Image: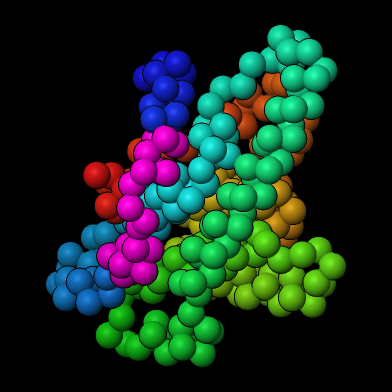
Amino acid sequence: MSNRVKLKKMKQIGKLMTTTKEIDWRAEYAKVAALGDVDEVAPAAAAQQTPSAPVDGVLAFLDCMLSEEGGDWWVAVQSVKPAAADKDDKEVKQTEANEKEQLKAAKKRLAVAGGALVVALPELNGSVNGKQISREAKVRVLQLQLVCRMLRYGTLAKKKKDARKAARKEIRGLLDRVALLLDAANPPSLADEDADERSPFQHFLQRELAPRLHKLLPDLMHYLLKTYELEDGQVGDGDQSKANDENALLPAVSSHRSHTSCAA
């Protein structure tokens, strides 16, 4: 699909956001979590599932939320921007101002949607610690709660240091648990730095979450990538070539959406 066609499609999606009925995110969350369905899978079949199986449903859910609640900002993120040289200073400043407002609005909508789905840790622990719950189901639920907490983090004011610190602690705790389940080993911060291939968790954080969320939550993503020793140039600010690289890493909005009603 060409960039022009992709941009046209994204603009059409953006227009539909204001005309379609509001999505029931709790229902969408329940579809992805689907604990009961996973528990009924035969042990042999469950053992054959790859680590990416629970991940894909969560990414579909996140893509859906970004598309529906991200509004004009997410459409702009997905589009290929013209070079700054093609615009005069006034137009550049106006564009930057518009993008700031769009980002602010997107953060609020996503924080509300994600925050409404956050489950308190004691309740969450009770739901995933049962022996009858499969590893895939645990990964999926923990990842869903991770994503919801990250989206909620977006509106925490910088001056609320204690609240931000507590939120980061919860997010890191969930990431460690996801790492243990995905890799069946220690958290990736202890992994071999010279390894040729990323572990499933490293791939999830660096190649799936980071491209989707680094423009929405730059400070948080920088902190997490640094914490897990996965920081690299792909999520930093820089020249136009770096910006182009970032756009190339952005996920196609329809790549994982078949798992949710957003695909309709």
Q: Which residue is drawn at 81% across and 63% down?
A: 158
Q: Is residue 8 magenta?
A: no
Name the spot of residue 39 as percent of width and height, x first.
22, 77
Q: Which of 79 and 146 is in front in this view?
A: 79
Q: Nearer the viewer, residue 61 or 46?
A: 61
**Whether residue 179 is situated above or below residue 238 in the rendered picture:** below
Name the image quarter holding the C terminus.
Answer: top left
Q: Residue at x 74, y 39 (%)?
A: 236
Q: How many labels does the image show?
A: 0
Whether residue 62 is visible, yes or no, is yes
Q: Residue at x 28, y 44 (%)?
A: 263
Apparent side of residue 174 relative to residue 57 in the rendered image (left or right): right
Name the spot of residue 22 as percent of width and height, x first.
37, 56
Residue at the extreme front of the image, as rendered? 19
Q: Give the range drawn in magenta.
A: 13-33
Q: Which residue is drawn at 34% across and 63% down?
A: 24
